[in-house]
Image (tube, rainbow, N blue to C red):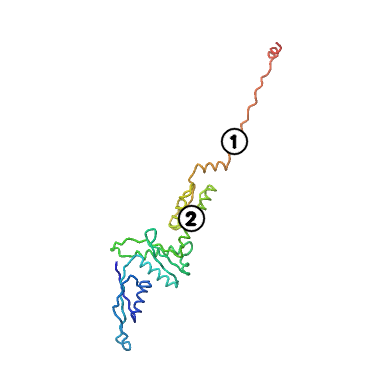
């Protein structure tokens, strides 16, 4: 869909600079720019006319997302680069890099997840009459998500090993849906354990439990030992009592 904006300034250059600020871009690559008014200084402020420009561009879902992120970075005085690329999960990936960008990650990526949620709201805030399909946008900062995934997979393997060693279920700390999917995926590759999610909303946790009940009972039996009971003793052999007739027979 074609969109357009107009901007004014004392000069054409100033008008274009304001247009870039509105769009949240550094250049007009792929856009159609038109000067509507050159602008006049006038005499002592009388008869002055502001320069006016028009910029036409192809509207894409990531455009409002980029505008939102760039505006946020500017308001927070954070110097960072923002790039857009295709995501493997049939969406768009917005990657933010910069020395000060780490402040937007937060504890275990909580701030980053909130930023991603707001960015998706901005990208998909469209007129319902347009019938536009929703676009999924992933926001990453300094490749944090790949590092976090590596950490979570290592955690899953370590906790699965612990569950198998001590023959008991292990409950992990609350995680968001994205992180829980990583844990579920990694545990699927480990024999003898499986996963389940318990809790609700932000307090939803993963439980790693044993799947081989037979081995579990066997290990428990070996640990506790055989059941105690009354010891059976052998009956003494019966001796035959001699009689007078026995002695008589021996003498014969």
Q: Quadrant of residue 96?
A: bottom left
Residue 95 to residue 215: above or below:
below
Q: Residue furthest top?
A: 252
Q: Are circles 1 and 2 on residues that touch, CB within 8 Å?
A: no
Q: Position of residue 73 (x, y in %)?
A: 42, 70
Residue highlighted by disc 2: 153
Upstream in the sequence, badge 1 or badge 2? Answer: 2
Q: Residue furthest right?
A: 251
Marks 1/2: CA distance?
48 Å
Q: Nearer the viewer, residue 247 or 135?
A: 135
Q: Position of residue 138 (x, y in %)?
A: 40, 62
| Residue 229 numbered mark, or none | 1
Secondary element at image label 2: helix
Q: Residue furthest front?
A: 29
Which residue is drawn at the image coordinates 65% and 24% (left, top)? Answer: 237
What quarter of the picture does the N terminus occupy?
bottom left
Q: Quadrant of residue 15?
A: bottom left
Secondary element at image label 1: loop
What quarter of the picture does the C terminus occupy?
top right
Q: Alpha-carbon neighbours of circle 2 within 10 Å: few (<14), some, or many (≥20)?
A: some
* Number of numbered labels in the structure image: 2
Which residue is drawn at the image coordinates 53% and 41% (left, top)? Answer: 218
| Residue 88 numbered mark, or none | none
Which residue is drawn at the image coordinates 33% and 66% (left, top)? Answer: 60
Q: Position of residue 221 (x, y in %)?
A: 55, 41
Q: Nearer the viewer, residue 229 or 140?
A: 140
């Amino acid at each position: 869909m074609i969109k357009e904006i107009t901007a004014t300034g004392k000069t054409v250059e100033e008008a274009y600079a304001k247009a870039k600020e509105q769009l949240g871009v550094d250049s007009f690559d792929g856009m159609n720019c038109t000067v509507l008014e050159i602008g006049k200084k006038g005499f002592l402020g009388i008869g002055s006319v502001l320069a006016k420009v028009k910029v036409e561009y192809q509207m894409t879902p990531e455009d409002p997302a980029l505008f939102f992120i760039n505006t946020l970075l500017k308001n927070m005085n954070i110097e960072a680069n923002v790039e857009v690329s295709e995501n493997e999960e049939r969406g768009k990936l917005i990657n933010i890099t910069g020395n000060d960008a780490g402040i937007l990650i937060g504890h275990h990526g909580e701030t980053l997840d909130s930023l991603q949620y707001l960015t998706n709201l901005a990208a998909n805030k469209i007129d319902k009459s347009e019938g536009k399909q929703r676009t999924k946008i992933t926001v990453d900062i300094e490749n944090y998500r790949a590092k976090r995934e590596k950490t979570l997979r290592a955690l899953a393997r370590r906790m699965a090993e612990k569950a198998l060693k001590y023959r008991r279920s292990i409950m992990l700390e609350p995680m968001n849906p994205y992180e829980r999917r990583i844990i579920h995926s990694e545990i699927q590759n480990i024999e003898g354990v499986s996963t389940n999610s318990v809790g609700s909303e932000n307090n939803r946790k993963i439980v790693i439990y044993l799947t081989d009940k037979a081995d579990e009972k066997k290990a428990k039996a070996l640990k506790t030992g055989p059941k105690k009971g009354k010891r059976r003793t052998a009956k003494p052999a019966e001796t035959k009592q001699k009689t007078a007739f026995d002695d008589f027979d021996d003498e014969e």
